[in-house]
Image (cartoon, coloured by chain):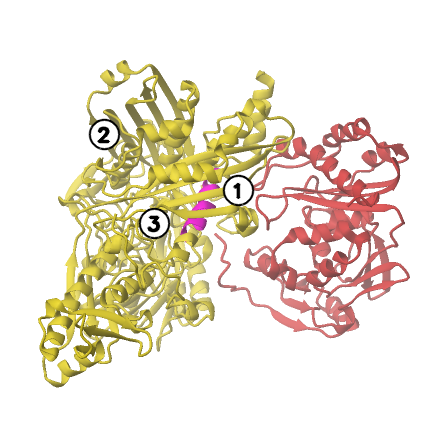
Amino acid sequence: MEKKKFSAVGKKTRRKDGYAKVTGRELYTSDISLPGMLHARVVRSPYPHARAVSVDTSQAEQMGAVCITYDHVPQMLYNERQVSIPEKTYRDRLVLAHKARHVGEGVAAVAHRTEKLAEKAAENVAVEWEQLPAVFDPYQAMQNDAPKLYDQIKLGEKDLAIENNIACQREVSEGDVKKGFAEADVVVEDAFRTGRVYHSQMETKSVVCRPEADGGITVWPTTQSIHNTRQLLGRIFDIPLAKVNVHRVPIGGAFGSSIQMNTPIAICVALALKAQKPVKLVLTREEDMYDHCKYPSIIRLKYGVKKDGTITAGEMQAVVDIGGHNIQAYPLLGCMTGWFVSLYRMPHLRFKGTAVYTNKAPACAMQGYGNPQVTFAVESMMDIIAEQLGMDPIDLRLKNYVGIGETFWGQGPTVRSIIRSCGVEEMLLRGKKKIDWDYRLPPEKKTGRYRRGIGVGRGFHTSGTGAPTPGEVIDYSTALVKINEDGSVDVSTALMCHGGGTLEACAKIVAEELSVPLEKVGISPSDTRSTGYDVCTHATRGVYCGGGSVHRAAILAKEKLLDFAGRLLEVNPLALEIYSETGSGQGIVHLPGTLSKNISIGEVAKTAQLKGWGTIFGMISHRQVNCPPCFVTNFIEVEVDTLTGIIKPIRTVAAVDAGTVVNPDLAAGQLEGGLCRGIALALLEDTDYDPQTGQLTCGGYFTDYKVYTPVDMPDLENVSIFSANTHEPTGPFGAKGIGEAANNPTAGAVANAVYNAIGIRLKEAPFTPEKVLMAIKDRNERV
Amino acid sequence: MGNTRVLTHEFEYLPTTSVPEAIQLLNEHGRNATIMAGGTDVIPQLKYSVIAPALLIDISKIPDLDYIKDQEGHLKIGASAKLRRVEQFCGQNRKYACLYDALFSIGKVQVMNMGTLAGNLCTASPAADSAPALLVLGGRVKLVGREGERIVDLNDYFTGPRKTVKAHDELMTEIIVPPVKEGMGGAFTKMARVGSDISKITCAVAVERQNEHCGECKVAMGAVAPTPVRLTAIEKMLTNKTIDENVLDEAKNQIAAYIQPLTDVRSTEAYRKQIAGILFKDTFQKAWKRAGGEE
């Protein structure tokens, strides 16, 4: 393994946007105010399934509002997510709907001078509704007599009839599962469920749009991809892309909920084009909660295993309740296959996934994209199997995990590459020691009211969706690295930072490559006109793919820099090196072994300017040809109060194999955040619907939608974090991703810890005290 | 769908600086006026469109109501004293440990810095955190109207969910906690979904202890009935008894019969009934230890 001393990469530094963020000076979309700007509100369906027979905006218009209804928007079905190739993109929605398929779907919108006037105008839009029967359960939705959400949608350019509310299905198989199960000594089968978690990102979806005099638009949205937003707006509103400019705005978290172009963006653009004035639309929290959530899953798993623990076959069936629109269910099912097959080796496997429409808020990616759901089921099953075989759960995992040299297809059947770095074994063995695994008692040895248990969960995520062959998913980034005339550096890319430090990592990668102090590397503001295409900051691809392209651009800039320096020093540029001089805060180009042959980067750039040689820069559009897994292992100790059913996390060890860790403290923060959300997936979070009204039982308010805060987590001294000693040869300075991986193993680890505490296998997350107490009571009655 | 971002309802905002002025405004405007002390209940209710007053009378600026004082053993808390200050005061006085637990359980810094004890009692939610604690401490409230003032025992104060004996033109100006006897110990416990949350169920106990003998005993619960409730039947099972596991378990097993919880977004009727006894026993034991100076 390459071991190198770094000057910027891997250092704890003060992040560049830190001051602005903690002092409130960072400008988010909701802070943007333009001269003459109007404020928008959306008229939404109070019913889960209803046709808007008529929409009368005359009163709102008399109040001075600019109004649009579904009649005033382009009648083009679109899909808000632009990551898959067009032939695999399911298009089922309009900018404003004729027919609402969930409570909160927009049918009209208004704009007025203030938000309050807009809200009043919206209240005065009269909608005549024809209520339709609604369906909330995916199994009921698949019945022949169930209410139909759609007759026909578009798949690419083709019409696609929707039968039994099935949005899409996917089947994958390798080998011969029949044979595999026949070879097994033990066959285990079980079913697991996870909830409909709301992203709870701090910033609600927001957008400002300014119509330009030339017929174009300028847009400041909450998004994870400015380029996809631009292309989609250009297509919907038929504007040449050269006239559509989308700015990168700092985002108050996303967790995947802005991979797609959020619904308010197109509504705001339509209003701005009609008003011919800038328009701003900021969702309320309750609107936001009706706009997106995690994919809830029902997973049936079957494994065949030999007595020695070798897995002979695996089969998974998944049913996903996607809500009222299909945002990215088809690639989701592909990924769910990938999550399943890439955790543990199976010579024979089969996957069948079904995505079903229901009259609920549309589900979309959320930290893991089906991975926490699948891994919860798989990791629970690993413990079930280990118990049946009388094997230590860690030994079973060590025997079967997919590791170095093996084919990895986490992102689904079309994204395959070879694993070149892997810290799985190191994390399991070091973590085992840290949590005192060997002193763990079986549940039957535990007595008393409060019982503690320790569980392990493995997981991984992909670093992006790159692969040697182009598949169904687009993945590349563009970067420009430019050396300024004083030796400082500008980095320009369309990557987003969701808070995790992606752009900070890019700056460190450039500082490292050019040997320039980190303070001298600036991240340029970014918009779609001045940057090349970047697919989206999603799929844990920021550092590996985005940072990879930035690294390559820096290498190109460095070549040019050394070329110019070589000319000035009269030295072969290939012999030159750069070091960072702390005193002057400059990178110095020098010929090793000499004292006279040196020149600062600033001097090279300035001289190049004066001599008319041009700007020193490197620019590249780059697709990574690998998709390395970032592995995470969680050990969790919980305490179960057997009288109340309350489960408390007591102690955790979280280990990550992210290759070279570029931002150590931010990576630790990601692991802590992932733990918190993962524990909440297991124990707390879900959005529940009232089957009578189709409304959220929490009303869309945080008063009754709860997330964990630090007081609910183990004390910090009981949270131990470490990284595996690995180096990814295809990553920038050996780095891989981390973001989603942090969350993926946690729910399974919690379920296994609970089992170790009380001997009850909980399979339906969240394990609320109400459910746990009932399970304990049922068990006690059986015994 | 509500709208917690834009408040379109228009109302007049009147900060008052004296109690007589506030009472006069209440009398002039009748039911069109709403009193606001910290706003932590009133503002959300406005946003949820639960209330739509024409006039909001802000009493938080009345200097005469911002106090916490000990008057010959009586704890007196003015209606505009912030929860944070009350919490800090109780944290320094062991005899109010029960009220301290209750206020601490609210957990949210912003709410503690804005909200008031009087507001908590005037909103009169069945789940109000301070109510069970004040009930077992024998708390009383001072209500001032045009005709003068009256002192109401909290036992007689709550009449239903968000309903009390306070007339609309009366202003709650003070909460009074009578002297706490020597040998009394109190505790409050709360079950909720997360650390800062509206309760699923709460319990407060105040108990007088001489060795293993229980003298006076008071038990109250929240979020188990239309109002915060005293459980006098349970108290009788313990008063003047020697406390052992059997006595406690008997009381624990009886609790479900005396409460009428509902199923709502926070929990279920069945769960609340199942754990009410457990919560009571935990709370009693904590109070008992404190009474014995063991904690």
Colour for chain B in the figure: red
Which type of secondary structure does the marked residue at label 2 adopt?
strand
Label 2, label 3: how many angstroms apart (C-alpha)? 29 Å
Q: Are marks 2 and 3 in contact (CB under 8 Å)?
A: no
Q: Nearer the viewer, mark 2 or mark 1?
A: 1
- Residue toward you, A767 or A635: A635
Q: Looking at the image, which residue is at 10% across and 84% down?
A: A611
Residue A158 locus on image (x, y percent): 15, 42
Label 2, label 1: how many angstroms apart (C-alpha)? 40 Å
Colour for chain A in the figure: yellow
- Residue toward you, A745 or A587: A587
Residue A22 locus on image (x, y percent): 46, 67
Which type of secondary structure does the marked residue at label 3 adopt?
loop
Please, which chain is the residue tagged with disc 2 on? A
Residue segment shown in magenta: A670-682
Residue A262 locus on image (x, y percent): 32, 55
Q: Which residue is mark 3?
A: A738
